[in-house]
Amino acid sequence: MEKIKIIKENIKSIPDFPKKGIIFRDITTLISNPVSFKAVIEAMEEALNLHELDRVVAIESRGFLFGSILAHKLGLPLELVRKPGKLPRQTFKETYDLEYGSDTLEIHTDALHKGDKVVIVDDLLATGGTAKATCKLIKQLEAQVIAAIFVVELQDLPGRKALEELENPPEVISLVKY
Amino acid sequence: MEKIKIIKENIKSIPDFPKKGIIFRDITTLISNPVSFKAVIEAMEEALNLHELDRVVAIESRGFLFGSILAHKLGLPLELVRKPGKLPRQTFKETYDLEYGSDTLEIHTDALHKGDKVVIVDDLLATGGTAKATCKLIKQLEAQVIAAIFVVELQDLPGRKALEELENPPEVISLVKY
């Protein structure tokens, strides 16, 4: 597909970031080009076209860049999953393991209604830790993750598997695969 | 204006967050309502209507929510100002004082071209520390901040003054004032 080609061409690969041996897929070059940024949003809209959705959940912080436009274009409420201490009202929390240590994500307890059909949005699917924690947060609110959409998927990491092994797994969609 | 009324009605005021005595203006309720989120974007577009702009610079992280849509709708490149260690390529840095301690922001050294006319976008203008550091980063790149736009301005804090005292000050625009 022409759009996917444009998207891939505008992602910069940075060796040894954030540490030696890692190739970082840099989306700042992608959003710095209005043509490739538009291609991302259109490709996401097309991929989600068949789903009936009630809300968009964007994951801090690069997920905000794509989730906000998607919510705006689809005319859906935008809800945030954020790092600890950022959301001012009552939250649910999920802690997940990192390579070294752990991290926590939060969502407002009133962000979703019971039964809401939700798409989660982030820039990158790697180990799936963040996305899986987000799915668990959404489950705590008794809503349903219909789809999880990412700009980039790192296929040698188990992110897709982590999501597909969940009870009621979402459709996992990524635009560009490495 | 009808739009500003809708925006203000959908911002929730949270007493004593993040600490006692502070009233936090919560924009999660604003973006959770597609009508008020749309009103923000339209009001921003109208306010920027008379400016010729080359790029949109969004400030991490809540600035991403509004800056991304604005860039997308205006068909302009989106550039990011981020917290330390997040941008993978060479950056310029600016450190600024907080009430306790200090913080640093970064921008890619190739994010802007010399002479670019830029609007910076964030959710909140309070003390102006973040916005001022962003203006300084943009000046390091020899670009020009034409406008600084915010959803909310806290008028009892010196943010507007801090920006208006800069050499070549931007137009400071806020949609809702407290």
Image: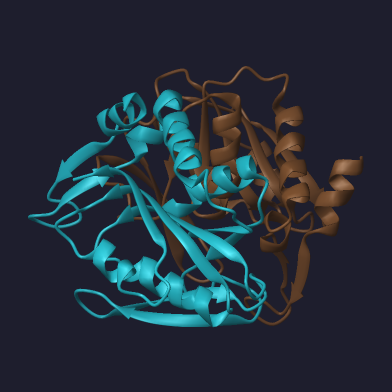
Chain colours: A brown, B cyan
Q: Is residue B174 above or below residue B97?
A: above
Residue A29 vs residue B43: left or right?
Answer: right
Q: Nearer the viewer, residue B138 or A105?
A: B138
Q: Nearer the viewer, residue B127 or B89?
A: B127
Residue A74 vs residue B39: left or right?
Answer: right
Q: Is residue A121 above or below residue A157?
A: above
Which x, y percent locates residue B54? 64, 58
Q: Quadrant of the N terminus of chain A?
A: top right
Is residue B23 in view from this perspective? Answer: yes
Residue that appears at 79% across and 54% down: A155
Q: Nearer the viewer, residue B29 or A160?
A: B29
Is residue A119 in view from this perspective? Answer: no
Count of marks placed on residues: 0
Residue that appears at 47% across and 30% down: B38
Q: Quadrant of the C terminus of chain A?
A: bottom right
Which x, y percent locates residue A130? 54, 51
Which x, y percent locates residue A28? 66, 62
Instruction: Farthest residue to the front: give it.
Output: B50
Instruction: Farthest residue to the right: give it.
Output: A1
Q: Is residue B121 above or below residue A76?
A: below
Which x, y percent locates residue B31? 41, 35
Q: Quadrant location of residue A24?
A: bottom right
Residue that appears at 89% across and 49% down: A5
Residue that appears at 70% across and 27% down: A48
